[in-house]
Amino acid sequence: MFEKVLIANRGEIALRIHRACKEMGIRTVAVHSSADADAMHVRLADEAICIGPPQARDSYLNVQAILTAATITNADAVHPGYGFLSENADFAAMVEEHGFAFIGPAPEHIRLMGDKIAAKRAAQEAGIPVVPGTEGAVENEEMALQVARDIGYPVLIKATAGGGGRGMKVAASAAELPGALATASAEARAAFSNGEVYLEKFLAKPRHIEIQILADMYGNVVHLGERDCSLQRRHQKLVEEAPSPALNADERQRIGQTVVEAVRTIGYRNVGTVEFLYEDGEFYFIEMNTRLQVEHPVTEMICGLDLVREMIRVAAGTPLGYEQKDIRFSGHAIECRINAEHPETFMPSPGRVGDYHAPGGLGVRVDSGLYSGYRVPPHYDSMIAKLIVHGANRNECMMRLRRALGEYVIDGLETSIPLHQRLMAEPTVINGAYDINWLETFVGGGH
Ligand code: MV4
């Protein structure tokens, strides 16, 4: 097992990784920007190194500084967290070339899943259902028109190098297709220096359901059920829950089994998430995320597993030591992402935290580095806390979540807590009847 892990991230996820390491008897190295010297995970880490100024490109994305920090602290492994360098295949390769373990998948799997056409092809070849569309890239207008006529309008044009919703264009008819193709390709070229696009049937009212998997180096693979992440605005998830209110046990078992077999076929290791759109009882693959995700705690709460601990174990070469039949799902979990932003305008609200009081009690978990007096820096993502609640069933979970939201005090900043309180009183949320479009309609498209 590793003796020392360098945490190449900040905020709540850096603290989350630190906690898993400490419980495993592993020492930690925090690397931080000059804006994060007072962060909770920096205080708690065994060693801390400032790797640059506030701008992420000069600190948390500074590969040379991070590798140097790992070298001088004599770390064994690097955990990338999410965002920043977590899905950068070149970074993963450099970490390994410098003699450290990368706590994540192999660089070639990160690279494969970063190319959205290659990922879709690999998924389909491994038996995962995909959205009908072009086999690979759109080569010309005639080809696009032909495929669109075969599958029917509306169609969606996506960038090969995209992901996370960037560079997508809908065409409702053949008349709109040439213009949409040109715009999508030009935007993709500008954003990713790669104008390649592909085309799919546009699904109008899907849910976003993702399957969590865990794999070791020896072909042992398990799935840890699904998360429903349909409550999102502008591709920012706000609430996630497990299990999905839309699935029954049979559907869960079938899609889980399909994903496990595909992951084993591909030879993937560590944690991963296979994202699907789910509409009218059918699953359609969209992407695979090759990192630990923000919303991993809802899976932990219903499975009783520490996913960060598992990723460290498998990266160190330890076999899983359990099988699918050993995974037991218990109850329901919901996560509310709490951002330092205005609950109606979504304007960022960085600044100094005044009084701070986190909720507690049975089934209540808060993942956050906040404390009274902490200054939320303006340079990074606005997420400052995750409130995760578990209950024996969905209703108990929501009752407990309302109670916990009511206890949470974060003075001095605007936060999304009031929005979460409104959401948890909404019939559509209470009934689990939302799709990926619902939240944007609810908060008003004007923002
Ligand atoms: C789609 C789609 C509808 N039809 N593909 C957005 C992010 C990227 N991961 C894929 N995305 C979508 N792909 C087809 N064929 C709608 C979306 C989409 C979406 C998906 C998941 C979660 C939130 C979303 C918000 C807007 C659009």
Image (tube, rainbow, N blue to C red):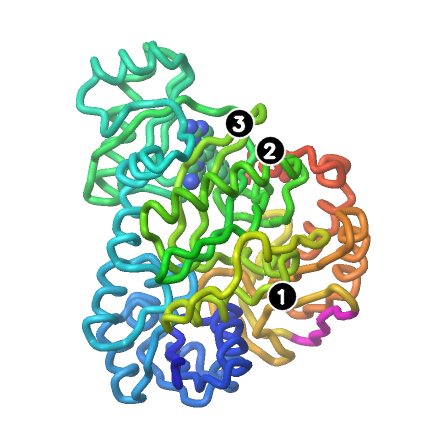
Q: Do the residues under discs 2 and 1 have CB atoms within 8 angstroms?
A: no
User: Percent x, y for residue 75?
Assistant: 33, 84
Which amino acid lies under the numbered mark 3 shown in the image of this protein?
A: Glu
- Measured in 3D between alpha carbons, the distance from the residue under mark 3 to the one under mark 1, in whole angstroms, is 42 Å
Residue 6 visible somewhere in the drawing: yes
Q: Is residue 274 above or below residue 438?
A: below
User: Percent x, y for residue 300?
Assistant: 60, 60
Foreground disc of the pair 3, 2: 3
Q: Is residue 243 above or below residue 59?
A: above
Relative depth, front residue between 201 and 98: 98
Q: Do the residues under discs 3 and 1 have CB atoms within 8 angstroms?
A: no
Ligand 1 picture quarter: top left
Q: Do the residues under discs 3 and 2 have CB atoms within 8 angstroms?
A: no
> Disc 2 designates what residue?
435
User: Percent x, y for residue 325?
Assistant: 58, 53
- Measured in 3D between alpha carbons, the distance from the residue under mark 2 to the one under mark 1, in whole angstroms, is 30 Å
Neighbours of disc 2 within 10 Å: few (<14), some (14-19), many (20+): many
Quarter of the image for residue 248 reads top right
User: Percent x, y for residue 394?
Assistant: 75, 47
Q: Which residues are magenta?
A: 354-361
Question: Circle 1 sits in a helix, a strand or a loop, which is it?
Answer: loop
Foreground disc of the pair 2, 1: 2
Relative depth, front residue between 101 and 365: 101
Identify which residue is drawn at 43% across, 83% down: 28
